[in-house]
Amino acid sequence: MDEPTILLTNDDGIEAAGLRAVYEGLSEVGDVVAVAPADDQSAVGRKLSHEVEVWGHEMGYAVDGTPSDCVVAGLESLVPETDLVVAGCNRGANLGAYVLGRSGTVSAAVEATFFDVPAMAVSMYIPVREDTDFTAIDDGDLRYDEAVRATRYLAHHGLEAGVFDQCDYLNVNAPVADWGPAPLEVTRPSLEYEMTAERNGDSVTLHDRIWEQMASGDIPDPEGTDRRAVVDGAVSVSPLTAPHTTEHHEALDELADDYDPTD
């Protein structure tokens, strides 16, 4: 196929170093147009606005809205000829099944699938504890080489290889580049869940203990899962379908048959 048109978005904001790194890398394999939030929209999920302001940017368009806003505005109005949507590179990993619905990065990829456009969510793991403020990390100190290399490879080969005939989107997580060359590993989202909550007077502190376990390398995740792959130094690629999938449930069928709306 000819060079694909790639819509690039993120949730860290259009000025984020991770987005620019991916923009430059993808420009080697396609025509890249950024349609990204004007400011940080991390962890907003698939929040959607009614109307957003848009203005030109050297890489494409800045949008006063969420990642999902960017995808809808991009595919329906700004870049309707898009062949592939890439969201990222996010500063921080998006690993585990419980994270998928929270992440603005992943949500942008999911939004694209409802337009029948293949998509990739791309994130980079930074080995820090949960109590570290990601906004305090200087983007200039981060190297996105492994994330960019994997993203460029998958964008260049994934469409023609038929990858998206069997999945809706890819959730890609790379280890920090300082760890050295990282192989690609096909994974599934980990089901491990380590959220706790502690009451402190009138407040409750929510704590995700997975981050400190990852920082120490002591995680419960089995082989074949996304988190295990990244901690072991590989780029995790999970082929996923957009929510929500349904299965036939005989028990629920029986309940529906027995339901009496007059009772």
Image: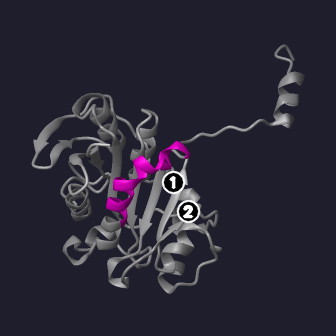
Image spot of residue 3 (x, y percent) = 26, 46
> Where is residue 236 drawn, in percent x and y?
49, 67
Q: Position of residue 231 (x, y in %)?
A: 50, 78
Circles 2 and 1 in contact, beta carbons < 8 Å: yes
Residue at point 32% right, 53% down? 11
In 3D space, how far apart are the residues under numbered discs 2 and 1 (Cα atoms)?
Answer: 7 Å
Q: Which of the 4 image quadrants contains residue 154?
A: bottom left
Q: Secondary structure at mark 2?
A: loop
Judge left or right: residue 100 versus residue 221: left
Residue 112 visible to the viewer: yes
Q: Residues within 10 Å of mark 2 (few under 14, many from 20)?
A: some
Q: Which mark is residue 100?
A: 1
Secondary structure character of the magenta stretch overall: helix
Q: Tell me, for residue 169, which label it has, or none.
A: none
Numbered range of the magenta stretch: 150-166
Give the mark count: 2
Quadrant location, the C terminus: top right
Residue receiving disc 2: 96
Q: Which one is nearer the viewer's eye here, 75 or 67? A: 75
Queried whether the magenta region covers residue 246, the answer comes back as no
